[in-house]
Image: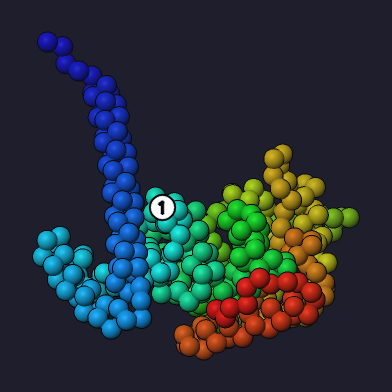
Amino acid sequence: MSKLPATANDNLHAELRALITTSRQRLAAAVNAELTRLYWTVGERLRTEVLGGADRAKYGDQLIQRVGEQLAQEFGRGFEAKNLRRMVQFAQTFPQPEIVATLSRQLSWSHFVNLIPLKTEQARQFYASQAAANTWSVRELRHQIDRKAFERTELASLQADAPIHTASNNASSHSPALVFKDPYFLDFLGLRQGHDEADLETAILRQLEAFILELGRGFAFVERQKRMVIDGDDFYLDLLFYHRRLRRLVAIELKLGRFKAAHKGQMELYLKWLDKHERQPGEEAPIGLILCAESSREQVELLEMHKDGITVAEYWTELPPKAELEQQLHQALLEARERLAQRGVLLEDKNEH
């Protein structure tokens, strides 16, 4: 009996291993989706039948407690009263079963558990769509929520007169309006007082992986100090990235102080040069991000920089306490919305975040 060649054996093993792994993944996804739909159905049933009327509210909690004890004995602790209450919250927070059915194919029950406490529907929509599109783990979703990704993305999107819910409804989650944030949290760089732009750039490159995570999914580093020769003079762009899903080059300039109107002309020049010399067939026009220690929001709005594909954002090398951070972002959002309202940009949603 001839011996099977090692290569053939290895190839067969690899093929069968891939089949088994893929099948298990599909099975796990199907089970997760079915469990999530079950939890929603249980929550909806309890919501409508147990907590539906004012007179029932008096004994509804006791009834959930009793039913929870019975179900937990039969089906395990996952159906204890506290989890049944969470299922009710789930049905209340996500009242449309078709949306739940769609999201349950991409998000786990643990994802939904982290989405339920969010204060606004717009925030839940944002995190749910981003988690699904970017295949965020539960840990990454928590990280994004803790780092206020929704509020910071909305602040950046308001520069383009595109409130985040409008941008996400009218375009894909890969719209340029949803790519940038304001501010960027660069606390992981460990910079000390008195640093210059070279220190900032060096620290970013040293912590490139963390910086790309802060930028968001889809960014790929291309080059530092990109040299451009224009009229015989040398110009250098601080950082050049490429966004795979947008199919665009992204130019990033680092500024230590406040934003100045002159920064716009500099970035416009860089984007024009990149568009002429670096843009490849099938790519969209390059876009730019100017990172400043402090933004000049009125100047940014008057210059209408979004029309030239440029976003201005602050970077913070130190983060304030959580309550102060929330207050600062909340105040910045209120002011940005007010300025848009004064310019006649209609906002459908004026809920506080």
Is residue 118 shown left or right of residue 334?
A: left
The residue nearer to you, when weighing 99 against 278, is: 99
Which residue ends up furthest to the right in the rendered image?
231
Residue 147 in sight from this viewpoint: yes
Is residue 198 shown left or right of residue 74?
A: right
Which residue ends up furthest to the front in the rendered image?
55
- Classify 245 as above or below 42: above
> At x 26% / y 36%, what residue is drawn?
20
Quarter in which the C terminus is drawn: bottom right
**Which quarter of the picture shows residue 164?**
bottom right
- Residue 294 is situated, as x and y percent measured from the top left of the image, at 68, 81
The residue nearer to you, when weighing 153 against 198, is: 153
SS for tag 1? helix
> At x 10% / y 65%, what residue is drawn?
73
Alpha-carbon neighbours of circle 1 within 10 Å: few (<14), some, or many (≥20)?
some
> At x 64% / y 54%, what residue is drawn?
171
**Which quarter of the picture shows residue 167?**
bottom right
- Classify 99 as above or below 292: above
The residue nearer to you, when weighing 187 against 68, is: 68
- Residue beneath label 1, please? 101
Residue 207 in sight from this viewpoint: no
- Amino acid found under the numbered disc labelled 1: Ala
- Residue 352 is situated, as x and y percent measured from the top left of the image, at 57, 81
- Residue 82 is situated, as x and y percent measured from the top left of the image, at 24, 74
- Residue 174 is situated, as x and y percent measured from the top left of the image, at 60, 54
- Classify 239 as above or below 191: above
